[in-house]
Every structure is written in structure tokens, then in C-alpha cells.
């Protein structure tokens, strides 16, 4: 009976009201503290940073209470300004809480280098494919009379002759010299086997042809031509004016070994 009377008393309702007010105030205070700690109340929209320098991107992000971090700068796009943002995460338009780090990918200031693939004695079509697949460009194509029609004879860039494995920057224009037959053959290839390099070169010049040294020490007077391509045509016309004859220089025993074969 006393308990029922207590529930009806002003003292009970006063205490109940004060307790309810206390818990409400406690809940609101905890919520405010949690928001202050986690910054859940501060949300920013990630801006589009494409094309900005790292300094410009950092300034824009600071204005949105966001941070910048460069994650990658190994990519190179020739059509984009060096040192500018080419990709970002989170993407533009996404929401992020204050203090979030935006990861940036920066366009390299210079293209990286790649190894030049084997191009000599490859078809022009294959050479073009190999160059473009490595981020290189096909430059000037020059055709010269040669039996190896359609094959690459020489590779250069900026006037410098290059060999397989040469380190060259992506985007570089690579010039190619390609063999091409023009009309019926007009010149015969003489026999150069057993000749020293200087003698072989002089004979070819008199024949209207050019020599290309492939292997061996041309300064060693004891070494002779032990292999040539094209071979001796025995008076038959097999090439054109300024056609190239490739020679390999070595000791005489190599020449004898070739004869026995």
C-alpha cells in the first residue's frame, strides 16, 4: 500500500523526471564526443584532380580537409603533361570523412627505357609490331636495293645505329632500312672467299656492290673471308646496284671446313 502511495507521490515523479533528463543528457553528450573523435560529422566530396600537379592537388585537397599521397609515378603518357595526376583513389565525386588520404598516380616526367628487340633480318611488318608493343614509334623507313626484300637491314635512332638490346626511351622514333628489289637483277656477286677484308671491299666496289662486315677482326691481316651472303653467283645476275654482300672474317681453317661441307 505504501509503495502504491509512493508511486503516486510528487517525490517519485520528480526523481523519475530528473533521472530521464540525466540519461538524455548523457546520451547527447556521448554522441557529441563520438562525433568529435571520429569526425563523422565532417564529410567531404573528393574533387577531380586530373591534370593537376602534385602541389596543386595537395592545395585543393587541403581545402577539403583531405590528404594527398603519391602511390605510383611509373606510368608515362606522351599526350599528358609530365608530373600531373593521371589517376586517383577514391574517384572524383566520392564522399570521404575529413583526414582521409587520396592516393594519386602521377605521370612520369620522362619516359622509361626499354630494350630494343631484335629487328635486323625481321620482316618490316614484324619489326613494326615489335616496336609498337614496347612503346616505341616507327620512324623513317628507307628502302635500299637488296636481295633480302622486305627484311630490315639496319636500325637507328637520331642518326645512331642501334643493336639488339640497346636501351632506348619509350616514345622514341626508330628508323629502319629495309631491303627491296627493283626490277630484274643487274649485278653478279663475285667470289670473296679467301680474301682479306680490304681486298673483298675493293672487289665489291669495282662490282658496284657494298660490303657489310658481320663477324671477325677486320684489322687482322691473317684473317680472311670464310663465309659470304649472297654466295658467288658465278657470273649470273642476282642483285642490283649497291646491293649488300655480308661477310664473315676468320682463320683459313674455317674456309677449308666450309669447302669440305
Image: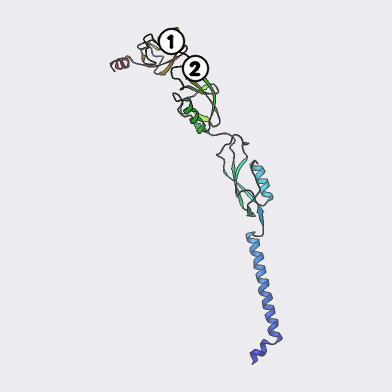
Q: Check disc 2 and report its element: helix, strand or loop.
A: strand
Residue drawn at x 65%, y 62% as measured from the top left: 35
Q: Check disc 1 and report its element: helix, strand or loop.
A: strand
Instruction: Please state, as top left, top right, bottom left or bottom right, where the C terminus lies in the image.
Output: top left
Instruction: Please state, as top left, top right, bottom left or bottom right, where the N terminus lies in the image.
Output: bottom right
Residue drawn at x 66%, y 71% as measured from the top left: 26
Colour pattern: rainbow
Residue 23 position (above or below residue 111): below
Residue found farthest to the left: 260
For label 2, the crowd category at 10 Å Cα-Cα, with few meaning under 14, some 14 to 19 and many 20 or more, is: many
For label 1, the crowd category at 10 Å Cα-Cα, with few meaning under 14, some 14 to 19 and many 20 or more, is: some
Q: Position of residue 13 (x, y in %)?
A: 69, 83
Query: Mark 1 and mark 2: span between their CA atoms?
Result: 15 Å
The answer to which quarter of the image holds residue 17 is: bottom right
Q: Which residue is mark 1?
A: 187
Decide if residue 167 is on the left or right side of residue 98.
left
Residue found farthest to the top: 206
Upstream in sequence: badge 1 or badge 2: 2
Q: Which residue is mark 2?
A: 144
Amino acid at each position: 500500500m505504501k509503495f502504491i502511495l509512493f508511486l503516486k507521490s510528487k517525490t517519485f515523479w520528480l526523481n523519475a523526471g530528473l533521472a530521464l533528463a540525466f540519461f538524455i543528457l548523457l546520451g547527447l553528450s556521448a554522441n557529441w564526443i563520438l562525433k568529435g573523435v571520429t569526425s563523422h560529422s565532417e564529410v567531404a566530396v573528393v574533387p577531380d584532380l586530373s591534370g593537376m600537379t602534385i602541389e596543386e592537388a595537395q592545395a585543393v585537397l587541403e581545402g577539403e580537409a583531405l590528404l594527398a599521397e603519391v602511390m605510383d609515378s611509373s606510368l608515362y603518357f606522351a599526350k599528358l603533361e609530365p608530373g600531373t595526376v593521371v589517376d586517383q583513389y577514391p574517384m572524383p565525386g566520392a564522399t570521404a570523412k575529413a583526414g582521409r588520404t587520396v592516393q594519386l598516380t602521377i605521370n612520369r616526367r620522362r619516359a622509361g627505357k626499354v630494350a630494343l628487340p631484335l629487328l635486323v633480318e625481321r620482316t618490316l611488318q614484324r619489326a613494326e609490331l615489335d616496336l609498337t608493343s614496347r612503346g616505341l614509334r616507327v620512324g623513317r623507313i628507307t628502302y635500299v636495293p637488296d636481295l633480302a626484300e622486305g627484311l630490315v637491314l639496319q636500325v637507328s635512332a637520331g642518326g645512331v645505329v642501334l643493336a639488339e638490346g640497346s636501351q632506348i626511351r619509350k616514345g622514341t622514333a626508330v628508323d629502319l632500312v629495309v631491303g627491296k628489289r627493283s626490277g630484274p637483277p643487274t649485278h653478279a656477286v663475285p667470289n670473296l672467299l679467301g680474301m682479306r677484308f680490304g681486298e673483298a671491299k675493293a672487289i665489291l666496289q669495282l662490282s658496284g656492290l657494298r660490303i657489310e662486315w658481320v663477324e671477325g677482326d677486320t684489322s687482322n691481316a691473317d684473317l680472311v673471308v670464310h663465309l659470304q651472303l649472297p654466295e658467288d653467283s658465278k657470273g649470273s645476275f642476282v642483285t642490283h646496284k649497291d646491293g649488300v654482300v655480308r661477310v664473315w672474317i676468320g682463320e683459313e681453317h674455317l674456309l677449308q671446313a666450309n669447302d669440305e661441307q
